[in-house]
Image: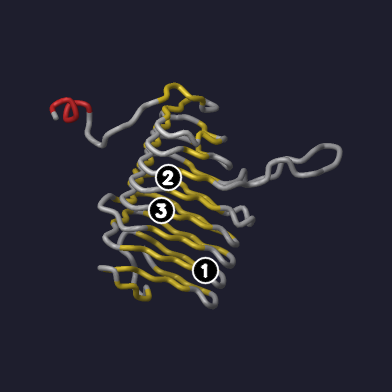
């Protein structure tokens, strides 16, 4: 783990007990590398990182993580040229996850509060390459924002792609591909591509045995 900042007017801060100060030391469990100007990183404590990396390239990017009693474990965050990743309170990321906002079009990935992201999930605002019309050569697959509402459970090995919206209190089934808006709250969506499986659902952090004993 380490902290590397190269460029001008970059602002890296942490917030401890409501007081903001410049980040000058390494954060345990999080490798931070910034290459560019006018970037902002703001991390609130309490916060627990394990085996995670934040890579920022270019200018005008913003990464924010609100305080959490849960961990961010094994996540690669990547931003390029004017993009944003915003993580709400008490979010949990569970190993081998990539969150990519790097299409150089000022796109954002926004997580609400109390979001759980399962192992092996990829969340990305663009395709990495350009699909073009064979005749006009016009681009056909522009990047787009991703918005994940509060209290959303994303199962293991999902793909959350550009333009995805997931409404609050919803569930994304394991190994699903979400590439459009499901803004309605309390949905269970699943499949490739994802579709609505059931409406009017909610979920709880407790496992089944613990929940049924309550």
Front in this rendered view, residue 79 or 18: 18
Marks 1 & 2, CB-CB < 8 Å contact: no
Answer above or below: position of 54 versus 202.
Answer: below
Dots 3, 1 in contact, CB < 8 A: no
Mark 2 — residue? 97
| Disc 3 target residue | 87
Q: Earlier in the sequence, mark 1 or mark 2?
A: 1
Across and down, in percent, residue 144 comes to 60, 46
Q: Is residue 152 left or right of residue 178?
A: left
User: Residue 177 at x, y = what percent?
Assistant: 51, 32
Count residues near mark 3 (Cα–Cα under 10 Å), then give few for <14, some for 14-19, many for 20+: many
State left or right for residue 85 relative to residue 67: right
Q: Position of residue 10 (x, y in %)?
A: 50, 74
**Mark closer to the chain start, 3 or 2:** 3
Q: Residue at left 36%, top 46%?
A: 93
Q: Quadrant of the N terminus?
A: bottom left
**Pointers 3 and 2 in contact (C-beta within 8 Å):** no
Residue 82, above or below 195: below
> Which residue matches tag 1?
39
Residue at 82%, 37% in the rendered image: 134
Which residue is located at x 41 percent, y 28 percent?
173
Secondary structure beneath disc 3?
strand
Residue 44, compared with residue 96, is above or below; it is below
């Amino acid at each position: 783990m380490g902290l590397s900042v190269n460029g001008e007017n970059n602002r890296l801060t942490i917030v401890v007990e409501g007081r903001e100060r410049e980040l000058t030391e390494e954060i345990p469990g999080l490798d931070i590398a910034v290459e560019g100007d006018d970037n902002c990183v703001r991390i609130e404590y309490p916060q627990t990182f394990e085996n995670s990396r934040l890579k920022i390239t270019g200018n005008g990017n913003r990464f924010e993580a609100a305080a959490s009693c849960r961990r961010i474990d094994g996540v690669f965050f990547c931003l390029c040229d004017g993009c944003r990743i915003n993580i709400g309170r008490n979010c949990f990321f569970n190993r081998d996850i990539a969150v990519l906002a790097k299409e150089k079009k000022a796109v954002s990935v926004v997580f609400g509060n109390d979001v759980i992201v399962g192992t092996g999930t990829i969340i990305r605002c663009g395709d990495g390459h350009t699909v073009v019309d064979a005749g006009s050569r016009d681009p056909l697959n522009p990047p787009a924002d991703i918005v994940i509402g509060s209290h959303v459970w994303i199962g293991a090995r999902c793909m959350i792609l550009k333009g995805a919206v997931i409404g609050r209190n919803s569930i994304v089934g394991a190994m699903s591909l979400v590439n459009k808006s499901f803004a309605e709250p309390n949905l269970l969506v699943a499949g490739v591509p994802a579709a609505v499986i059931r409406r009017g659902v909610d979920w709880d952090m407790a496992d089944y045995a613990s929940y049924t004993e309550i």
